[in-house]
Image (cartoon, coloured by chain):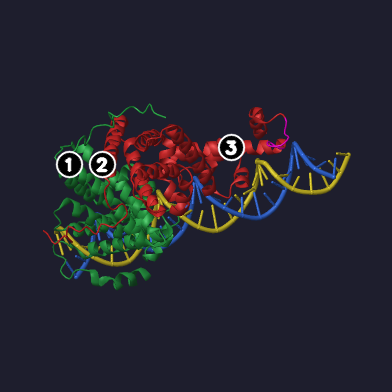
Chain colours: A green, B red, C yellow, D blue
Amino acid sequence: MLTRVAKASVSKLVPKVPSVAGATRRAAYSASTKRALIDVAEERFTEAGYASASLDAIVSGARVTKGALYHHFSGKQALFEAVFERVEQDASKRIQKALKGKKDPWNKAREGLRAFLVVVQEPAYRRIVIQEGPAVLGYERYREQEERSTFANVLEIVRSVLEAGKWELDDPMVQTYARIFFGAMSSAGESVASALDPEEAAVRVEGAVAFLLAGVQLMVENGLPLPNALAAVPGGDDREN
Amino acid sequence: MLTRVAKASVSKLVPKVPSVAGATRRAAYSASTKRALIDVAEERFTEAGYASASLDAIVSGARVTKGALYHHFSGKQALFEAVFERVEQDASKRIQKALKGKKDPWNKAREGLRAFLVVVQEPAYRRIVIQEGPAVLGYERYREQEERSTFANVLEIVRSVLEAGKWELDDPMVQTYARIFFGAMSSAGESVASALDPEEAAVRVEGAVAFLLAGVQLMVENGLPLPNALAAVPGGDDREN
DNA sequence: CCGCCGACATACCGTTGGTACGTACTTAGA
DNA sequence: TCTAAGTACGTACCAACGGTATGTCGGCGG
């Protein structure tokens, strides 16, 4: 009964002409409840964390029952993954928008960093993607998801920066650089978000990254060596001390 | 009964003269079972993950009951934290050993990185510290723990590297650099450990970091600018495109 | 020798994720 | 319009798990 009311209350979402995309009315209802589930789940997961967010709370928040949940998702983890995906793609789009039109690799990097530092301060992204993502999904699935969203952005930025140099490096090496940067950004983002003064922390992070970028830039301009060679530094194998 | 046998089998750990440190025999028994709990817990947590590792399995593996567990620890999370702490300190010690005697900051950094890349390939460290640590402990407690172990090592390395430059930067800034590097290393470590060819991946990571280090080194030698200034780059506010 | 207390064991509870099954409402087809 | 089919749920239930309350046994100080 309550369910009926619930459906009625969101019925404005139902397309007037269920012709092609929205298809039938049933499908629209269905999609609506699925959305509601994901919405509430995102909220609960963000607030309470994955383990402490009970399915009962989620389904009651979405004004459905577990039957509905298990009709749309194979389980709690699948629901989390759906939420994860949406949060990730949201973030990715916003970062891409910040990159829009920027062409100079260095500015692109700085702008992307800034956008990321904004995104990473949102509770949902912090908790769901950075904090609990790897643990809940497992590193494999986590990586797969990232690969086609935020990490893709980082990869693009890193690639364009590295291409500013004349060295040509194979794709795995670019991936390696991107991995390193992505990890750095995630960690930095967490520390920014949890700092007493996030603004100040963000400034510090931007400064630090700008510094490192300047180092790379210097090497580019001086046309310098070994981009992907190992640290078999000629100086000496450290027989000092 | 079984418990009795278990205790007897490890009774060689009991000090012959329970005078000062080991104290009474009871205390020694107690410490022994606590150790056993942590041992088994580390194993189970590493294999199955935090959520899927049941307390029943852990206590039965340690040949005790939940009564014993809840006598020594306040709950599952506390047990995890004990395991976490041990794994972390183990890793920290090993890294410190690798740093032993190295004085040149750049070599120290490279050596520390190499040691870290070894440590991070051990399943226990990967799973407990990197993957599940932040999610289970929460970022706050996670950071507190790291602060006094592995992160301390990174901090020291970063500090010594940065001090190679003539700039003086305040402590928070050094912390920021260390955070960035630590995050980079964690992520890189994960990708190394989960790569099809960890050896090759490790080489790539070392190469990439060496490259970045070379950039910093270049800036040091050229006595270059703005270590902690923001990227208010004079070049232009990016009205390009 | 004895009373006490620490170090467990045992039995039990509430909650949770997950499943099996029932059912009402839609929609396609005649 | 009527009906058969199937989708999209709701309901009732279960096993497993983390956690707790209480009992008990053996060592240890006096």
Q: Amino acid at mark 2?
A: Leu
Q: Is residue A74 visible?
A: no
Under circle 1, the secondary element is loop
Q: Which residues are magenta?
A: B17-23
- Disc 3 or disc 2, which is closer to the eye? 2
What's the CA distance linking mark 2 and mark 1? 10 Å
Residue B163 position (above or below residue B21)? below
Which residue matches tag 2? B218
What's the CA distance linking mark 3 and mark 1? 57 Å
Which residue matches tag 3? B35
What's the CA distance linking mark 3 and mark 2? 49 Å
What subunit carries mark 1?
Answer: A
A6 within the magenta span: no
At label 2, counting other C-alpha atoms closer than 10 Å, the crowd grade (few under 14, some 14-19, many 20 or more) is some
Which residue matches tag 1? A222
Residue B151: x and y in percent read: 43, 44
